[in-house]
Protein backbone atom coordinates (compact mmCIF):
# COMPACT_ATOMS: atom_id res chain seq x y z
CA UNK A 1 0.00 0.00 0.00
CA UNK A 2 1.64 3.24 -1.12
CA UNK A 3 1.50 6.38 1.00
CA UNK A 4 0.71 8.68 -1.92
CA UNK A 5 1.01 12.35 -1.01
CA UNK A 6 2.31 11.67 2.49
CA UNK A 7 5.75 13.00 3.35
CA UNK A 8 7.56 13.52 6.61
CA UNK A 9 9.87 16.54 6.19
CA UNK A 10 10.04 17.41 9.87
CA UNK A 11 11.38 14.14 11.27
CA UNK A 12 14.82 14.23 12.85
CA UNK A 13 17.48 11.55 12.83
CA UNK A 14 17.05 9.35 15.91
CA UNK A 15 19.49 7.28 17.87
CA UNK A 16 17.18 4.72 19.39
CA UNK A 17 15.63 3.35 22.55
CA UNK A 18 17.25 1.63 25.54
CA UNK A 19 15.03 -0.12 28.08
CA UNK A 20 15.60 -1.95 31.36
CA UNK A 21 12.49 -2.98 33.32
CA UNK A 22 12.27 -5.27 36.35
CA UNK A 23 9.66 -6.02 39.00
CA UNK A 24 8.55 -8.92 41.17
CA UNK A 25 4.93 -7.90 41.68
CA UNK A 26 2.10 -7.84 40.83
CA UNK A 27 3.78 -10.28 38.43
CA UNK A 28 7.44 -10.81 37.53
CA UNK A 29 8.98 -8.88 34.66
CA UNK A 30 12.68 -8.71 33.90
CA UNK A 31 13.63 -7.39 30.45
CA UNK A 32 16.47 -5.32 29.00
CA UNK A 33 17.03 -4.43 25.35
CA UNK A 34 18.07 -1.76 22.86
CA UNK A 35 16.06 -0.88 19.76
CA UNK A 36 17.66 1.18 17.00
CA UNK A 37 16.02 3.76 14.72
CA UNK A 38 15.74 1.28 11.85
CA UNK A 39 14.56 -1.64 14.00
CA UNK A 40 11.17 -3.26 14.33
CA UNK A 41 11.32 -5.30 17.53
CA UNK A 42 8.55 -7.89 17.74
CA UNK A 43 7.67 -8.83 21.33
CA UNK A 44 6.21 -12.31 21.06
CA UNK A 45 4.98 -14.73 23.68
CA UNK A 46 1.93 -16.32 25.30
CA UNK A 47 -0.86 -14.32 26.93
CA UNK A 48 0.05 -13.01 30.36
CA UNK A 49 3.79 -12.93 29.71
CA UNK A 50 4.08 -9.16 30.25
CA UNK A 51 4.09 -7.87 26.66
CA UNK A 52 1.55 -5.08 27.11
CA UNK A 53 2.99 -4.09 30.50
CA UNK A 54 6.39 -3.66 28.86
CA UNK A 55 4.91 -1.21 26.35
CA UNK A 56 3.10 0.65 29.14
CA UNK A 57 6.39 1.04 31.03
CA UNK A 58 7.98 2.66 27.98
CA UNK A 59 4.99 4.98 27.54
CA UNK A 60 5.03 6.00 31.21
CA UNK A 61 1.68 4.38 31.98
CA UNK A 62 3.16 1.82 34.40
CA UNK A 63 5.99 2.31 36.90
CA UNK A 64 8.02 -0.84 37.48
CA UNK A 65 10.02 -1.24 40.69
CA UNK A 66 13.25 -0.92 38.70
CA UNK A 67 13.33 0.86 35.38
CA UNK A 68 15.65 2.80 33.12
CA UNK A 69 14.24 4.08 29.84
CA UNK A 70 16.26 6.31 27.52
CA UNK A 71 15.05 7.55 24.13
CA UNK A 72 17.43 9.45 21.85
CA UNK A 73 19.62 10.40 24.78
CA UNK A 74 16.70 11.69 26.86
CA UNK A 75 16.06 9.81 30.11
CA UNK A 76 12.35 9.08 30.48
CA UNK A 77 12.56 6.87 33.56
CA UNK A 78 15.24 6.14 36.16
CA UNK A 79 14.11 4.36 39.31
CA UNK A 80 17.52 4.97 40.87
CA UNK A 81 16.95 8.73 40.96
CA UNK A 82 13.15 8.67 41.04
CA UNK A 83 12.89 10.33 37.64
CA UNK A 84 9.63 9.60 35.80
CA UNK A 85 8.75 11.76 32.80
CA UNK A 86 4.94 11.84 32.48
CA UNK A 87 3.32 10.21 29.47
CA UNK A 88 2.24 13.46 27.80
CA UNK A 89 5.87 14.62 27.69
CA UNK A 90 7.13 11.45 26.01
CA UNK A 91 6.89 11.55 22.23
CA UNK A 92 5.35 8.11 21.99
CA UNK A 93 2.94 6.89 19.35
CA UNK A 94 0.88 4.16 21.04
CA UNK A 95 -1.75 1.96 19.39
CA UNK A 96 -3.69 0.25 22.19
CA UNK A 97 -5.45 -3.11 21.94
CA UNK A 98 -8.77 -1.36 22.64
CA UNK A 99 -7.86 1.50 20.27
CA UNK A 100 -8.19 4.23 22.95
CA UNK A 101 -10.19 6.56 20.69
CA UNK A 102 -12.23 9.49 21.98
CA UNK A 103 -15.87 8.41 21.47
CA UNK A 104 -17.17 11.99 21.08
CA UNK A 105 -14.73 12.85 18.27
CA UNK A 106 -14.84 11.91 14.62
CA UNK A 107 -12.06 9.92 12.98
CA UNK A 108 -10.58 13.21 11.79
CA UNK A 109 -10.96 14.76 15.23
CA UNK A 110 -9.20 11.85 16.89
CA UNK A 111 -6.17 12.26 14.65
CA UNK A 112 -6.24 16.06 14.98
CA UNK A 113 -6.10 15.61 18.76
CA UNK A 114 -2.55 14.32 18.36
CA UNK A 115 -1.50 17.52 16.57
CA UNK A 116 -1.79 20.07 19.37
CA UNK A 117 0.11 23.32 18.91
CA UNK A 118 -0.63 23.65 15.20
CA UNK A 119 -3.20 25.89 13.56
CA UNK A 120 -6.59 24.24 13.08
CA UNK A 121 -6.39 24.31 9.28
CA UNK A 122 -2.94 22.75 9.29
CA UNK A 123 -4.02 20.08 11.78
CA UNK A 124 -6.98 19.16 9.58
CA UNK A 125 -4.78 18.87 6.49
CA UNK A 126 -2.17 16.71 8.20
CA UNK A 127 -4.82 14.52 9.87
CA UNK A 128 -6.58 13.97 6.54
CA UNK A 129 -3.31 12.85 4.96
CA UNK A 130 -2.71 10.31 7.71
CA UNK A 131 -6.23 8.93 7.37
CA UNK A 132 -5.65 8.60 3.63
CA UNK A 133 -2.41 6.76 4.34
CA UNK A 134 -4.34 4.04 6.18
CA UNK A 135 -7.13 3.88 3.56
CA UNK A 136 -9.83 5.78 5.47
CA UNK A 137 -10.56 8.55 2.97
CA UNK A 138 -14.28 9.33 3.06
CA UNK A 139 -14.71 8.24 6.67
CA UNK A 140 -13.28 11.38 8.29
CA UNK A 141 -16.59 12.49 9.82
CA UNK A 142 -17.55 9.17 11.38
CA UNK A 143 -17.35 8.62 15.11
CA UNK A 144 -15.80 5.42 16.52
CA UNK A 145 -19.17 3.79 17.25
CA UNK A 146 -20.01 3.89 13.52
CA UNK A 147 -16.71 2.35 12.43
CA UNK A 148 -15.81 -1.33 12.24
CA UNK A 149 -13.13 -2.75 14.51
CA UNK A 150 -10.59 -2.71 11.71
CA UNK A 151 -11.44 0.90 10.84
CA UNK A 152 -11.09 2.00 14.47
CA UNK A 153 -7.74 0.25 14.59
CA UNK A 154 -6.58 2.20 11.54
CA UNK A 155 -7.72 5.50 13.06
CA UNK A 156 -5.63 4.64 16.13
CA UNK A 157 -2.63 3.89 13.91
CA UNK A 158 -3.04 7.17 12.01
CA UNK A 159 -3.26 9.07 15.31
CA UNK A 160 -0.12 7.39 16.67
CA UNK A 161 1.84 8.25 13.52
CA UNK A 162 0.56 11.83 13.47
CA UNK A 163 2.16 12.54 16.86
CA UNK A 164 5.62 12.79 15.25
CA UNK A 165 6.73 10.00 17.61
CA UNK A 166 10.26 9.23 18.71
CA UNK A 167 9.16 5.64 19.29
CA UNK A 168 6.15 3.73 17.99
CA UNK A 169 4.44 1.18 20.27
CA UNK A 170 1.96 -1.16 18.59
CA UNK A 171 -0.13 -3.48 20.78
CA UNK A 172 -1.87 -6.01 18.51
CA UNK A 173 -2.35 -3.41 15.74
CA UNK A 174 -3.70 -5.88 13.17
CA UNK A 175 -5.96 -8.02 15.35
CA UNK A 176 -9.30 -6.80 13.95
CA UNK A 177 -8.19 -6.46 10.33
CA UNK A 178 -8.98 -8.97 7.59
CA UNK A 179 -6.22 -10.80 5.76
CA UNK A 180 -6.27 -8.75 2.54
CA UNK A 181 -6.14 -5.39 4.33
CA UNK A 182 -3.57 -6.75 6.79
CA UNK A 183 -1.17 -7.33 3.89
CA UNK A 184 -1.62 -3.76 2.62
CA UNK A 185 -1.17 -2.29 6.10
CA UNK A 186 1.97 -4.37 6.56
CA UNK A 187 3.36 -2.66 3.48
CA UNK A 188 2.23 0.78 4.63
CA UNK A 189 3.74 0.36 8.08
CA UNK A 190 6.98 -0.92 6.59
CA UNK A 191 7.21 2.18 4.38
CA UNK A 192 6.31 4.52 7.24
CA UNK A 193 8.98 3.15 9.56
CA UNK A 194 11.62 3.44 6.82
CA UNK A 195 10.74 7.11 6.35
CA UNK A 196 10.33 8.00 10.03
CA UNK A 197 13.40 6.07 11.20
CA UNK A 198 12.10 5.57 14.72
CA UNK A 199 12.23 2.42 16.86
CA UNK A 200 9.07 0.32 16.52
CA UNK A 201 7.93 -2.18 19.15
CA UNK A 202 5.30 -4.60 17.90
CA UNK A 203 3.31 -6.83 20.25
CA UNK A 204 1.40 -9.48 18.35
CA UNK A 205 -0.04 -12.96 18.83
CA UNK A 206 0.16 -13.67 15.09
CA UNK A 207 3.56 -14.91 13.98
CA UNK A 208 2.80 -13.80 10.42
CA UNK A 209 3.16 -10.20 11.64
CA UNK A 210 6.54 -11.07 13.14
CA UNK A 211 7.78 -12.72 9.95
CA UNK A 212 6.57 -9.89 7.70
CA UNK A 213 7.69 -6.87 9.72
CA UNK A 214 10.27 -7.64 12.39
CA UNK A 215 13.98 -7.02 12.10
CA UNK A 216 14.47 -8.31 15.66
CA UNK A 217 12.51 -10.59 17.99
CA UNK A 218 12.21 -10.61 21.78
CA UNK A 219 10.57 -13.76 23.15
CA UNK A 220 8.78 -13.22 26.45
CA UNK A 221 7.54 -15.98 28.74
CA UNK A 222 6.50 -15.54 32.35
CA UNK A 223 8.03 -12.07 32.39
CA UNK A 224 11.44 -13.41 31.36
CA UNK A 225 13.24 -13.24 28.04
CA UNK A 226 14.62 -16.63 26.90
CA UNK A 227 15.84 -15.26 23.56
CA UNK A 228 16.28 -11.97 21.74
CA UNK A 229 18.15 -10.79 18.67
CA UNK A 230 17.91 -10.44 14.89
CA UNK A 231 15.00 -12.43 13.51
CA UNK A 232 17.30 -14.60 11.38
CA UNK A 233 19.27 -15.67 14.46
CA UNK A 234 16.36 -16.25 16.85
CA UNK A 235 14.29 -18.24 14.35
CA UNK A 236 17.30 -20.43 13.52
CA UNK A 237 17.77 -21.66 17.08
CA UNK A 238 17.17 -25.38 17.49
CA UNK A 239 16.98 -25.24 21.29
CA UNK A 240 13.88 -23.05 21.68
CA UNK A 241 10.51 -24.67 22.55
CA UNK A 242 8.59 -23.06 19.70
CA UNK A 243 5.52 -25.20 20.36
CA UNK A 244 5.04 -23.35 23.67
CA UNK A 245 4.59 -20.17 21.65
CA UNK A 246 2.04 -21.78 19.35
CA UNK A 247 4.50 -21.70 16.45
CA UNK A 248 6.23 -24.45 14.52
CA UNK A 249 10.00 -24.14 14.20
CA UNK A 250 11.18 -22.52 10.99
CA UNK A 251 13.91 -20.34 9.52
CA UNK A 252 13.28 -16.73 8.46
CA UNK A 253 15.48 -14.71 6.13
CA UNK A 254 15.34 -12.08 3.40
CA UNK A 255 15.52 -12.88 -0.30
CA UNK A 256 15.44 -11.08 -3.64
CA UNK A 257 13.28 -12.04 -6.59
CA UNK A 258 15.67 -12.68 -9.48
CA UNK A 259 13.12 -13.63 -12.12
CA UNK A 260 9.50 -14.66 -12.61
CA UNK A 261 8.50 -17.40 -15.05
CA UNK A 262 4.76 -16.99 -15.46
CA UNK A 263 4.52 -19.88 -17.91
CA UNK A 264 5.86 -22.28 -15.27
CA UNK A 265 4.22 -20.41 -12.40
CA UNK A 266 7.54 -20.09 -10.55
CA UNK A 267 9.75 -17.30 -9.24
CA UNK A 268 13.47 -17.64 -8.61
CA UNK A 269 14.77 -16.15 -5.37
CA UNK A 270 18.33 -15.59 -4.27
CA UNK A 271 18.99 -15.80 -0.54
CA UNK A 272 21.72 -16.47 1.98
CA UNK A 273 20.65 -20.13 1.98
CA UNK A 274 20.96 -20.42 -1.80
CA UNK A 275 18.68 -20.22 -4.83
CA UNK A 276 15.03 -21.05 -4.20
CA UNK A 277 12.11 -21.65 -6.56
CA UNK A 278 8.69 -20.68 -5.18
CA UNK A 279 5.18 -20.12 -6.60
CA UNK A 280 5.23 -16.82 -8.49
CA UNK A 281 1.81 -15.48 -7.45
CA UNK A 282 2.04 -11.73 -6.85
CA UNK A 283 5.83 -11.53 -7.14
CA UNK A 284 7.85 -9.36 -9.50
CA UNK A 285 11.53 -9.21 -10.40
CA UNK A 286 13.90 -7.25 -8.11
CA UNK A 287 11.43 -7.23 -5.20
CA UNK A 288 12.80 -7.89 -1.72
CA UNK A 289 10.77 -10.42 0.23
CA UNK A 290 10.86 -12.17 3.59
CA UNK A 291 10.95 -15.97 3.44
CA UNK A 292 10.01 -18.54 6.08
CA UNK A 293 10.90 -22.21 5.65
CA UNK A 294 9.00 -24.41 8.16
CA UNK A 295 11.36 -26.95 9.73
CA UNK A 296 8.83 -29.76 9.39
CA UNK A 297 8.88 -29.27 5.59
CA UNK A 298 12.65 -29.75 5.25
CA UNK A 299 13.79 -33.26 4.30
CA UNK A 300 17.38 -34.40 4.86
CA UNK A 301 19.32 -36.61 2.45
CA UNK A 302 22.88 -37.94 2.53
CA UNK A 303 23.25 -37.61 -1.26
CA UNK A 304 21.69 -35.50 -3.99
CA UNK A 305 18.52 -37.33 -5.08
CA UNK A 306 17.30 -37.69 -8.67
CA UNK A 307 13.82 -38.09 -10.12
CA UNK A 308 11.95 -35.93 -7.61
CA UNK A 309 9.20 -33.40 -8.24
CA UNK A 310 10.60 -30.85 -5.80
CA UNK A 311 12.83 -28.03 -7.04
CA UNK A 312 14.88 -26.97 -4.03
CA UNK A 313 17.88 -29.15 -3.17
CA UNK A 314 20.35 -27.20 -1.03
CA UNK A 315 23.84 -28.42 -0.07
CA UNK A 316 24.25 -28.05 3.69
CA UNK A 317 26.09 -29.30 6.74
CA UNK A 318 24.92 -29.84 10.30
CA UNK A 319 25.65 -27.14 12.88
CA UNK A 320 23.61 -28.41 15.82
CA UNK A 321 21.33 -31.27 16.75
CA UNK A 322 18.53 -30.46 19.19
CA UNK A 323 17.58 -32.48 22.27
CA UNK A 324 16.92 -36.17 21.54
CA UNK A 325 13.34 -37.38 21.26
CA UNK A 326 10.77 -38.66 18.81
CA UNK A 327 11.06 -35.34 16.94
CA UNK A 328 14.43 -33.60 16.69
CA UNK A 329 15.22 -30.13 15.34
CA UNK A 330 18.48 -29.93 13.39
CA UNK A 331 20.21 -26.62 12.59
CA UNK A 332 21.95 -26.54 9.22
CA UNK A 333 24.37 -24.24 7.46
CA UNK A 334 23.21 -23.74 3.86
CA UNK A 335 25.29 -21.28 1.87
CA UNK A 336 25.91 -18.37 4.23
CA UNK A 337 22.50 -18.80 5.85
CA UNK A 338 20.90 -21.26 8.21
CA UNK A 339 17.94 -23.62 8.03
CA UNK A 340 16.10 -25.72 10.57
CA UNK A 341 14.90 -29.23 9.80
CA UNK A 342 12.53 -31.20 12.04
CA UNK A 343 13.01 -34.94 11.61
CA UNK A 344 12.37 -38.09 13.61
CA UNK A 345 14.85 -39.38 16.13
CA UNK A 346 15.04 -42.50 13.99
CA UNK A 347 16.16 -40.40 10.99
CA UNK A 348 18.88 -38.79 13.11
CA UNK A 349 20.22 -42.26 13.94
CA UNK A 350 19.89 -43.73 10.43
CA UNK A 351 21.51 -40.76 8.68
CA UNK A 352 24.10 -40.34 11.45
CA UNK A 353 23.15 -36.69 11.81
CA UNK A 354 25.80 -34.93 13.87
CA UNK A 355 27.62 -31.57 13.79
CA UNK A 356 29.79 -31.24 10.69
CA UNK A 357 27.93 -33.92 8.72
CA UNK A 358 27.36 -32.87 5.05
CA UNK A 359 23.76 -33.32 3.92
CA UNK A 360 21.26 -32.02 1.40
CA UNK A 361 18.20 -30.06 2.51
CA UNK A 362 15.14 -30.71 0.33
CA UNK A 363 12.26 -28.21 0.36
CA UNK A 364 9.07 -28.24 -1.70
CA UNK A 365 8.37 -24.93 -3.44
CA UNK A 366 4.80 -24.80 -2.13
CA UNK A 367 6.05 -25.20 1.46
CA UNK A 368 8.06 -21.98 1.39
CA UNK A 369 6.18 -19.00 2.83
CA UNK A 370 6.92 -15.73 1.02
CA UNK A 371 5.97 -12.45 2.71
CA UNK A 372 6.31 -9.04 1.14
CA UNK A 373 5.17 -7.43 -2.10
CA UNK A 374 2.13 -9.34 -3.25
CA UNK A 375 1.29 -11.02 0.04
CA UNK A 376 -2.17 -10.70 1.48
Image (tube, grey):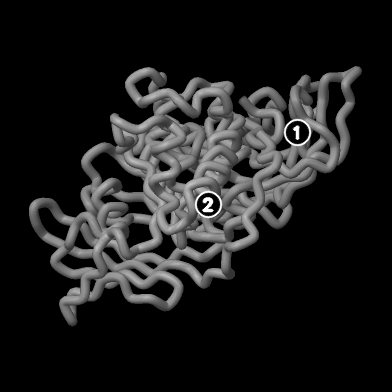
Seen at 70% across and 39% down, the residue is 4
Query: How far across and how far down the image is residue 54, in percent?
Result: 28, 54
Q: Residue furthest bottom?
A: 81
Q: Quadrant of residue 87?
A: bottom left
How many numbered marks does the figure carry? 2
Task: Confirm whether residue 328 shows in the render.
Answer: yes
Question: In front here: 41 or 323?
Answer: 41
Q: Height in image: 214 above or below 139?
A: below
Mark 2: give few (<14), some (14-19) or many (20+) Cα within 10 Å: many
* Residue 161, percent from left and from top: 49, 48
Secondary element under disc 1, as helix, strand or loop, is strand
Q: Which labelled disc corresponds to residue 231? A: 2
Q: Give the quarter of the figure containing the C terminus.
A: top right
In three-dimensional space, the C-alpha distance between marks 2 and 1, rounded to whole angstroms, equals 23 Å
Chain-order first, disc 2 or disc 1? 2
Residue 277, image x, y percentages = 78, 32
The residue drawn where x is 26% and y is 58% is: 57
Q: Which residue is nearer to you in this view: 63 or 355?
A: 63
* 186 to the left or right of 105: right
**Residue 275 visible, this orientation:** no
Residue closer to the observer: 59 or 238? 59
The residue located at (45%, 53%) in the rendering is: 163
Indicate which disc residue 312 carries. Answer: 1
Q: Nearer the viewer, mark 2 or mark 1?
A: 2
Horizontal relation, residue 56 to residue 35: left or right: left
Q: Residue at the spot x=55%, y=53% of the render?
A: 215
Placement of 142 over or under 124, stated as above or below: above
Quadrant in the picture for residue 325: top left
Q: What quarter of the picture does the N terminus occupy?
A: top right
- Image: 37 above or below 250: below
Amino acid sequence: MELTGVSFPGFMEHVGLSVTVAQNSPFPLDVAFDCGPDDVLAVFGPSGSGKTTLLRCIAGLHRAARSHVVCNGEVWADSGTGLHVPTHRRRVGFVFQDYGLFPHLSALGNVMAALGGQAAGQRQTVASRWLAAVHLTGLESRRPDSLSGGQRQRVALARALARDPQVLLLDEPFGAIDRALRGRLHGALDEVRRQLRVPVLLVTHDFRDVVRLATHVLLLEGGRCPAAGPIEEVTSRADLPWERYGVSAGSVFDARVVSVDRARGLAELTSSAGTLLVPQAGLHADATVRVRVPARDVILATCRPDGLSLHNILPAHVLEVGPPGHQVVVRLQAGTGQLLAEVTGDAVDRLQVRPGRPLFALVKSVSIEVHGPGDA
